[in-house]
Image (cartoon, rainbow, N blue to C red):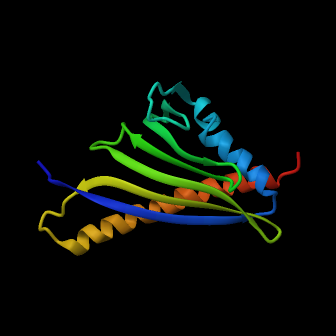
Amino acid sequence: MVEQVPVTMVNHVALEMAAAPDAVWREILSDYVEAKKFREFGTIEPLDDPAAIFGGYRMRFEQDGVVDERIVHITERDAAARRLSVMADYLSVPGGMRVYATYHAREAAGGTSYVIDCHTSVKVDAPADGDGPDLAATVAEMTSGADVHLNAYLASIKARVETPG
C-alpha cells in the first residue's frame, strides 16, 4: 500500500473584465450560491446543518464518466464588498479533498477584477524513496493544473459578462 501525505496547494488568479462589478457579483452568486452551473449536470440538495449559517448544499453530478460529489458551506457572503467565501469537501476524491475559496468582484479601472483565492488540502502518494523534491514537483504540477482550470473558469465568466445582451 502506498503511503499518502497531506499537502496544501494555494492558487491566486485574477482577470480584468470590462463589466460592472455588480454584473460579475451576480455571476458569482449564480454559480456558487444558486449553484446554477451545477444544476444542469446533476442534483443539488440544501444542507440541513446549523453550521451552514450562510447556506450550503450537497451536490452530485456526473459528466463524461467523472463523478463530482461535494458538500459546500458558504462561509462568508459580503454583498457590500462583493465577496463570497466557501468551504467544500470533495467526497468523490479518494482520500478526500477540502477547498477554501474566496470569489471577489473588485472594482477596477474600466470594470472589474474578478479575483479567486483558493487553498486546497489533499493527500498525495508519498514518493517511494521519500524524496522531498519529487513531492514538491508533484504539488507544483497539481497547483499549475488548478491554475489552468481556474483561469479557464474566469475566461468563461469574462465572455458572459462582456457579451452584450
Farthest bottom residue in view: 133
Image quadrant assignment for residue 126: bottom left
Residue 103 occupies which quadrant of the picture? bottom right
- Say if 49 sits above or below 148 in the image: above
- Specify whether residue 67 is in view: no
Tell me: 142 left or right of 1: right
Looking at the image, residue 116 sits to the left or right of residue 164; the answer is left
Residue at 55% in and 38% down: 54
Q: Position of residue 49 (x, y in %)?
A: 44, 28
The residue at 24%/75% (across/down) is: 133
Q: Tell me the residue at 44%/43% (across/down).
A: 88
Comparing 105 with 150, the one in front is: 105
State whether residue 16 is above or below residue 133: above
Query: Which sits in the foreground, 153 or 64?
Result: 153
Nearer to me, 18 or 131: 18
Percent of width and height locating residue 71: 44, 35
Which residue is at 63% across, 57% downward?
A: 104
Left or right: residue 120 compared with residue 77 = left
In the rendered structure, the answer to whether residue 113 lies left or right of residue 145 reads: right
Q: Position of residue 150 (x, y in %)?
A: 55, 57
Q: Is residue 108 visible?
A: yes
Residue 107, given in percent of the width and then of the height, sits at 75, 64
Disc count in the image? 0
Quarter of the picture holding the C terminus: top right
